[in-house]
Amino acid sequence: MACSVDAPSLKDLPKVATDLKSQLEAFNPSCLKDVDTNEKIVLPSAEDVAKEKQHTALLQGVEQFQPILLRKTETVEKNVLPNALDVATEKTQKSLFDGIEKFDATRLKHTETNEKNPLPDKDAIEAEKEKNKFLNGIENFDPTKLKHTETCEKNPLPTKDTIEQEKTA
């Protein structure tokens, strides 16, 4: 894709100011800093190219589609009607719903409800409180509050003389 362009003539070129022209002629390229250039054009990956080819092939397939190649078909619509059992079930449900919607609450008789109170009497409550107090005393027992005691036997063993007297008797 080479383009051929004729060079412009001298009179067609733009005019440059003389002071700018002198600055450009006196320009020293050694005063420039060294800079590494980075390519910012990222080429597509092989996967991207493959996806694009697939997409263009799909579009071409759609554009070049020929409906003449399709075969004629007739559609058969199947409408499944309910059987007698389904109809009977639906009628029963419908009649139940109608009965609920048209229910007349004024035809009900007035009733008195007896509320039974299954709470325990005072004696049972007191007995349970005593039992809980006793169990708490056992569970929360602190052995560090006990006083140190020494045991003293009050049933002394018999001496040898007493044993011999009992043997002879």
Image: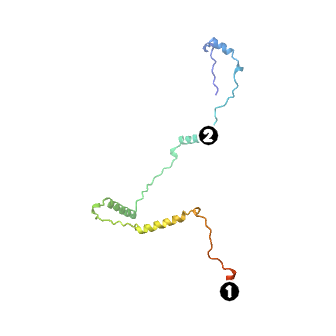
Q: Please say if the residues under marks 1 and 2 sit with CB atoms less than 8 Å apart.
A: no
Q: Nearer the viewer, residue 125 or 7?
A: 125
Percent coordinates x, y for residue 135 in the rendering:
51, 66
- Residue hosting label 2: 48
Q: Residue furthest bottom?
A: 169
Q: How is the image coloured?
A: rainbow
* Quarter of the rendering occupied by the C terminus: bottom right
How many residues crowd around disc 1 within 10 Å: few (fewer than 14), some, or many (20 or more)? Answer: few
Percent coordinates x, y for residue 94 in the rendering:
35, 60
Task: Reply above or below: 110 against 8.
Answer: below
- Residue hosting label 1: 167
Percent coordinates x, y for residue 49 in the rendering:
62, 39
Q: Residue furthest left?
A: 107
CA distance for labels 1 and 2: 119 Å
Q: Nearer the viewer, residue 112 or 84?
A: 112
* Quarter of the rendering occupied by the N terminus: top right
Q: Residue furthest top?
A: 18
In primary-sequence order, the first of circles 1 and 2 is: 2
Q: Nearer the viewer, residue 159 or 134?
A: 159
Q: Write down the quadrant of residue 6 in the picture.
A: top right
**Residue 161 seen in the figure:** yes
Task: Reply above or below: 42 against 74.
Answer: above
Query: Tag 2: residue type?
Result: Asp
Q: Nearer the viewer, residue 123 or 6?
A: 123
Q: Residue at x 65, y 13 (%)?
A: 21
Q: Secondary structure at mark 1?
A: helix
Is 112 situated left or right of 73 in this image?
left
Of the residues tagged 1 and 2, which is closer to the observer?
1
Percent coordinates x, y for residue 116 in the rendering:
36, 67
